[in-house]
Image (cartoon, rainbow, N blue to C red):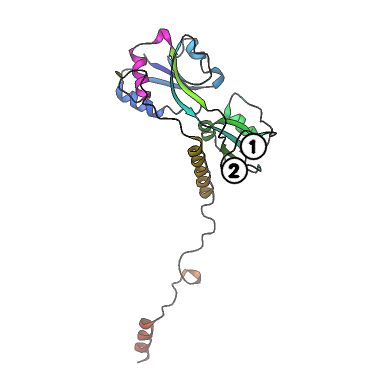
Amino acid sequence: MTLRLRYVAGVSPSKWLRVWNDLRPDLPLEAIVVEESEQLDALVAGEADIAFVRLPVDTEDMHAVALWEELAVVVLPKEHPLAEAESLTLADLEGETLAPVQDDPAMTIELVAAGTGHAIVPHSVARLHRRKDVVAIPVTDAPPTQISLVWPRERDDADIQQFVAVVRGRSAKSSRGSADDPPPMKPAKAAKLAAAERRAAAAKSGDGKGKGKKGGAKGGRPAPRTGAGAKQRSRRRGR
């Protein structure tokens, strides 16, 4: 018997997998990533027990626990005139062409890199599919997306509740409505974080440039010594 988990791109369940495996070695956790357009299909078909989903989705007949919000970013080609901005607004993007949206976010970002337009995606998705020929810039007034944990009402049992408690960092006996989840990151802070990531990436790509040879004289030989010590040795040799 296994606990069957599905999750969308941008969610990283590895830390909860480790905790769960330590806590419940008797009930292995099967985690499979799914396309966003198919994020509820396995639950509805009875092929999964619980899922991390990106709202909006139809959660009728489902239990849903809101977890965190994701900042929206715009992905632009690296040579785009707006690519150096620390942050942007939706008004800044008026008149800009949108890249064709694909089911696979990686393909959407590849189309951006090819110059077909820009894409607005969750920050977590942009980080997952980051590449050197595009940049991701926070859009401060774009609505954030919401990640929730959902499962069918008829599947609500002690195992599911224990996994929900693990994800929320609570004991299994804590109340479901506890407000101990971390608050969503403010746009200004997220913009600074994204800018710092871009600077770090730029610095990393520039490693090795402008570095000269270490040492003194040409050819790697040590430079001749000067000063009182050198004069004293010269007098000794002249005796």
User: Would you say 81 lies left or right of 208 here?
Assistant: right
Say if 36 sits above or below 79 in the image. Answer: above
Q: Quadrant of residue 31?
A: top left
* Residue name at image x 62 percent, y 37 percent: 76
Numbered range of the magenta stretch = 152-171
Residue 52 in sight here: yes
Quick one: label 2, few (<14), some, or many (20+) residues within 10 Å? Answer: few
Q: Quadrant of residue 93?
A: top right
Q: Determine whether label 1 and label 2 are within 8 Å by CB.
A: yes
- Between disc 1 and disc 2, the foreground one is 1
Quick one: label 1, few (<14), some, or many (20+) residues within 10 Å? Answer: few
Most foreground residue, 228 or 170: 170
- Secondary structure under badge 2? loop
Of the numbered discs 1 and 2, the one sitting upstream in the chain is: 2
* Residue name at image x 50 percent, y 32 percent: 124
* Residue name at image x 49 percent, y 10 percent: 60
Most foreground residue, 133 or 117: 117
- Mark 1 — residue? 92
The amino acid type of the residue labelled 1 equals Asp
User: Would you say 104 lies left or right of 152 here?
Assistant: right
The amino acid type of the residue labelled 2 equals Ala
- Mark 2 — residue? 85
Residue 8 in sight here: no
The x, y position of residue 221, in whole percent, is 45, 71
- Secondary structure under badge 1? helix
